[in-house]
Image (tube, helix red, strand yellow):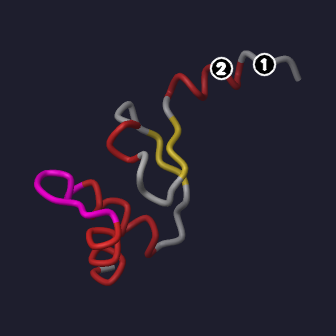
Amino acid sequence: MFGHWVSLVTAFQVIGRRVHDARLVAVMLAHGITHLLTFNHYDFRQFPITVVTPGDLLALSKQPS
């Protein structure tokens, strides 16, 4: 996991409080998790994951099948 974190922090020039977001993404990558459900999509937009908001899920549920 540390290797993923260092790569993310270096590649995306993460500093300050955002290192905690990078740590979460590093854990995700280490375990093969590709999607994150969050209200705070803005902080995760630069990372190589798919960010989903509750609004995205509501919009999908209202689409005709």
List x then y, in percent, for residue 37. 47, 41
The C terminus is located in which quarter?
Answer: top right
Name the kind of residue labelled 1 in the image. Answer: Gln
CB atoms of marks 1 and 2 within 8 Å: yes
Q: Is residue 61 left or right of residue 46?
A: right
Q: Is residue 9 left or right of residue 41?
A: left
Residue at the image position 55 percent from the left and 59 percent from the top: 34
Q: Give the crowd class for mark 1: few <14, some 14-19, many >=20 residues within 10 Å.
A: few
Residue at the image position 32 percent from the left and 43 percent from the top: 43
Magenta span contains residue 17: yes
List x then y, in percent, for residue 15. 15, 59
Residue at the image position 11 percent from the left and 55 percent from the top: 16
List x then y, in percent, for residue 4. 36, 77
* Image quarter of residue 62: top right
Helix, strand or loop under label 2: helix
| 2 w.r.t. 59: above or below | below
Residue 63 bears which disc, if any? 1
Q: Hey, which residue is sitting farthest right in the picture?
A: 65
| 19 w.r.t. 61: above or below | below
Q: Is residue 51 left or right of residue 44?
A: right
Residue bearing mark 2: 59
List x then y, in percent, for residue 30. 43, 75
Query: The magenta stretch spans which residues?
Result: 12-20
Name the kind of residue labelled 2 in the image. Answer: Ala
Magenta span contains residue 50: no
